[in-house]
Amino acid sequence: MRGINYIKTICTAVIIMLFIVAGTKTGHAQQDPVYTQYMNNLMSVNPAYTGVRGVGSISGIFRKQWLNLKGAPTTSSLTLSMPLDSLHVGGGMDFLHDNFGHFSTTALFLDYSYRIRATQTTQISFGLKAGFNYVQSRLTEIDRYHYDDAYILEYGDYTRFLPNFGVGVFWYGEDFYAGVAVPRLMQNEYTKDEVEVQAASREQRHYFLHGAYMIQLSPTTVFKPGLTTMITAGAPVTADFDFSFLFLDRFWLGAMYRISDAVGAYAQVQLNQNLKIGFSYDYTHTRLKNFNDGTFEVMLRYDFKTKGTQVFPHLGF
């Protein structure tokens, strides 16, 4: 119990420090995509999640944001992970393609994790990811008042290959998990020779905090409240509050509230021991609600056994 309280104190201190860091800088924008079904896409932001489920798996999410709004974001994410239990490590890969109007990002990262036992019932995983973002800008294609705008003509179209790396920590047990991650530590510049738009011309660090707790309501029903928070210096804090129910270890029904942005719901089904599918829909409650018909996601995950002693935990992550 003393060990758990000690770790909780450390986690609380880290969270406070991250909020302080996020609040002391200005002029930057949030750049990473958000998801409604974060609980099935943790590896894309936290490399320490790699392999902690004890099974090899491949997972994909397709997200179409702000339906019927021209140029709205479309995001595709694919992750592959494999545990090496004898070495207490996990390895994997995550791929992302995000397209927002005339700006797109394609990312490919390799992930590694190492697990240690924290207490008799909990483990801590430390993760590292390394890879690159390939950024494309086509601003000369946008409709604008001055078609001879000097900045857009000179800097509007470009491609950048941006190497990067990230870190994360993931603490988990039979009925909970908590993690903190910075998936990209380097703040690469998009345009190297232009200083007047410095705030918008570089990658920004995003700090992710996430956690959930499983509460057994009956032999057939589990309730899981969860939280995913994304912090970027100078941008509003994005926090998703997730409330879901698991029935018969197979059916998930949940609702989500994103601060100052959207509300949503999702359903997931474990079709068999290996295959899980999910669908979500969220609707913004900002002024954008007058110009779009909501956002949907489709999730698909396939788990495969690599040896007979492995199990398929039902913790919902």
Image: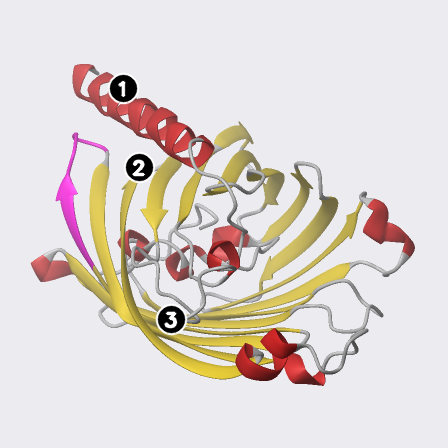
Q: What stretch of residues is rendered in magenta?
A: 113-121
Camera-nearest residue between 141 and 85: 141
Camera-nearest residue between 53 and 292: 292
Q: Is residue 66 toward the left or the right of residue 1 in the image?
A: right
**Residue that appears at 44% across and 37% down:** 25
Mark 2–mark 1 Cα distance, whole angstroms, equals 17 Å
Quadrant in the picture for residue 81: bottom left
Residue 9 is tagged as: 1
Kind of residue at badge 2: Gly
Kind of residue at badge 1: Thr
- Against 7, is 22 above or below? below
Q: Where residue 309 appears, x then y in whole percent?
A: 22, 61
Q: Where residue 50 appears, x then y in whole percent?
A: 29, 59
Secondary structure at numbered mark 1: helix
Q: Tell us which disc is closer to us: 2 or 3.
A: 3
**Residue that appears at 52% across and 36% down:** 226
Residue 192 is tagged as: 3
Q: Tell us which disc is closer to us: 2 or 1.
A: 1
Neighbourhood count class around disc 3 (C-alpha, 10 Å): few under 14, some 14–19, many 20 upward: few
Camera-nearest residue between 83 and 97: 97
Q: Is residue 260 toward the left or the right of residue 220 in the image?
A: right
Neighbourhood count class around disc 2 (C-alpha, 10 Å): few under 14, some 14–19, many 20 upward: some
- Mark 2 or 1 closer to N-term? 1
Asked whether the viewer can see residue 82, the reply is no
Secondary structure at numbered mark 3: loop
Q: Where residue 257 appears, x then y in whole percent?
A: 68, 39
Q: Is residue 188 toward the left or the right of residue 146 in the image?
A: left
Kind of residue at badge 3: Lys
